[in-house]
Image: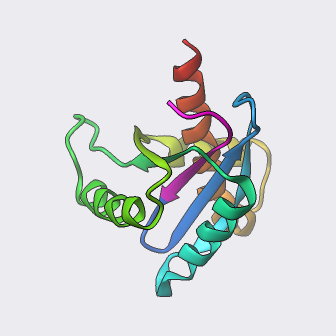
Amino acid sequence: MSSGRVISLDIGTVRIGAAVSDPSRIIAQGLGVWQAEGGKWRDDLREAVRKYEPGIIVAGLPLRTDGRNSEAAERVIAVVGELREEFPGIEFVMWDERFTTTIAQKAMIEADASRRKRRKNVDKVAAVLILEGWLEAQRT
């Protein structure tokens, strides 16, 4: 497994949430929310890869509650296949993201974030949760 920073992606059809770890892979912080439509988010990802030089990109895999692939999971798998071709030097990992968006929304409600702020940031918070889960699994 490579060393250095890790980027995580919460890949949706409307928005892509992104997060990045520190170089020692202890802390995850949100990078942003990128618009999925039009593919501009790929430019944002290229810029993040250039800036942070990750060894790994973790993509959230939206499985069904019974663990089987959903239509959204199949879409993510296809997108990750394209990204693997575009970034051949980076390892791509799929990570079960079940309930991360729900957890992110609950956390933001508890923090008294407005609906507008929640809608704007929930994907970024979900990406942070995906990355935190993956980082914790690597430590144990």
Near-viewer residue (107 or 67): 67
Residue 71 coordinates in the image, percent (x, y): 23, 60
**Quarter where residue 15 is shown:** bottom right
Report if residue 75 is visible in the image.
yes
Q: Which segment did they paint magenta?
A: 1-10
Residue at figure coordinates x 75%, y 60% from the top left: 51
Residue 75's spot in the image, x, y percent?
29, 63
Q: Is residue 31 left or right of residue 77?
A: right
Nearest the eye: 100 or 79: 79
The correct choice, above or below, for 30 with respect to 136 in the image is below
Q: Where residue 3 appears, x then y in whole percent?
A: 62, 33
The residue drawn where x is 61% and y is 72% is 34
Q: Quadrant of the C terminus?
A: top right
Q: Residue furthest top?
A: 140
User: In the image, is residue 131 above or below residue 124?
Assistant: above
The answer to if 9 sits in the magenta stretch is yes
Which x, y percent locates residue 13?
42, 72
